[in-house]
Image (cartoon, rainbow, N blue to C red):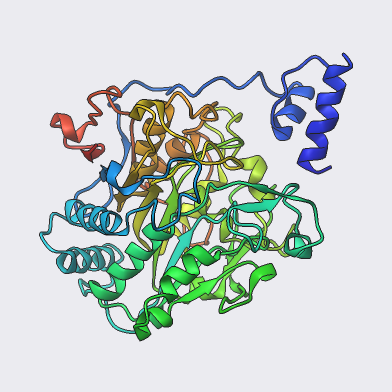
Amino acid sequence: MRRRCFLRSLAAAQAAGLVHMPLVLPWEAIAQQRGAMAPVEPFKPSEEANHPIGVGQGIYPGRVVWIRDANATSWDGAAGHWWDDAHTNQKVVHSMTSRLLQNLTGRKHDRQAWDALFRSFNNAHKAGSSGYRPGERIAIKINCNQDRSPEWGTMASDSAPSGAARGGGPPRVAQNGLPSPHAVVALVTELIEMAGVRGEDIMIYDATGIRNIGQPIYTRIRANSHPEFQAVKFLVGADYNLGGRMSPTPDMMHPIQFSKGEVPIGYLPRQVTEAKYMINMALLRPHGMAGVTLTAKNHFGSVHFPNDGGWSPRALHSSVLRTQRMGSYNALVDLVGHRHLGGKTMLYLLDGLYTAEHNEGSVFRWASFDGHWASSMLISQDPVAIDSVALDILRNEPRATEVRGNADNYLHEAAQAAKPPSGTVYNSDGRGTLASLGVHEHWNNATARKYSRNLGGKEGIELIAWV
């Protein structure tokens, strides 16, 4: 039964007095009916503040940089759209991206920062200390979960798959929790003009079958007449491989063998496995199923299940629920730990310029920023650290009401992947048990925002915040 139909039936039953339970998302409602869970409470850390676990990654281990600049966002919430050039300042977003790179690497120029990042990655992967070499491909994973129709900012009300989203299907509803075109342009511009990457070696993608990379992103890249910008590639779901966009081809030679037998074997796009590097450019956003959707869950848009939905993440849903107990298996660890996903990711970014209230919602103004937009971007080389900081940011925003349950279970598992609390042997690519994927902890409080390294510790997270 589709979600909307389920909710209507449940609401009708409640109105008729046939059931007595809160109206919640269907996967949680089903679990409650089966007696599998109590109502989901707002997220609270299970451990004390400044109690780091795991091993920090990066040039400066565990470093995360967070920049907020209210000058980047000026939409009044009514006229036009937030992604219009009049409402997002491209110059400011470029400046934010440059500052992120320099603060992360400790370098004074963007070219130096990129060179340091490539050398750091190659050194960590025992590939020498070389920088970027022409011809090496880079895949950029963005989160286009709400881009499910040809019309940017709307999607089919039932998230109808296959051709229905193109026309003749269910009515479309306005939802604008989308990637910032200006943030994507800033990243691509940095790669071409500062890192020296050829446009033909850059691919922006979200491979889920019903997802598109809409015109506001596509046309802003193509608006630059320089041949390098014209050569950038776009990989999208099969429903939208039109107008200069490609469809993914599953690479059957590189499976993801999830560490819990209930999850079927998955496969990645060949266009991803053939890339040397990846940049994970996710959204800063709550999630009604997982609690949060950040860099780890961004890879729900990377997997093909030939026997369970094709280019769809539905086979993974039950293994990432925020209702699972702490110390449970979580498929996000298998994704982050796979050699062709987290294993080739040189940089993690979170786009929080205009943040959505949850995965099916629209953008909202933050109470913790006096009713203004989040206007934020984050960067790190450590996938666990950046998601940990993002979770702390979101859990302290009163309007981010979907940050519930055990939203950081996957972070505990990933930080301790060699010996996780669940006892799972994480080995999704068959190369042996994973080592720690990064460092996790929670800050001391929402005012000071200090992590262990900020307080003089030799382990844990270091947050550089310009807020």
Q: Position of residue 444 (x, y in %)?
A: 27, 23
For residue 30, above or below residue 375: above
Q: Residue at x 58, y 40 (%)?
A: 361
On the picture, is 159 further left or further right than 110? right
- Does 322 sit above or below residue 65? above
Q: Residue 261, how many percent across, how many down? A: 67, 49
Q: Is residue 71 left or right of residue 201?
A: left
Q: Is residue 169 left or right of residue 247?
A: right
Q: Position of residue 124 (x, y in %)?
A: 27, 62
Residue 374 or 387: which is nearer the viewer? 374
Quarter of the image for the N terminus: give it.
top right
Foreground pick, 71 / 415: 71
The image position of residue 324, as x and y in percent, is: 60, 30
Q: Residue furthest left?
A: 108
As drawn, 456 above or below 272: above
Q: Is residue 452 above or below residue 235?
A: above
Q: Residue at x 53, y 47 (%)?
A: 177
The answer to whether residue 263 is seen in the rendering is no
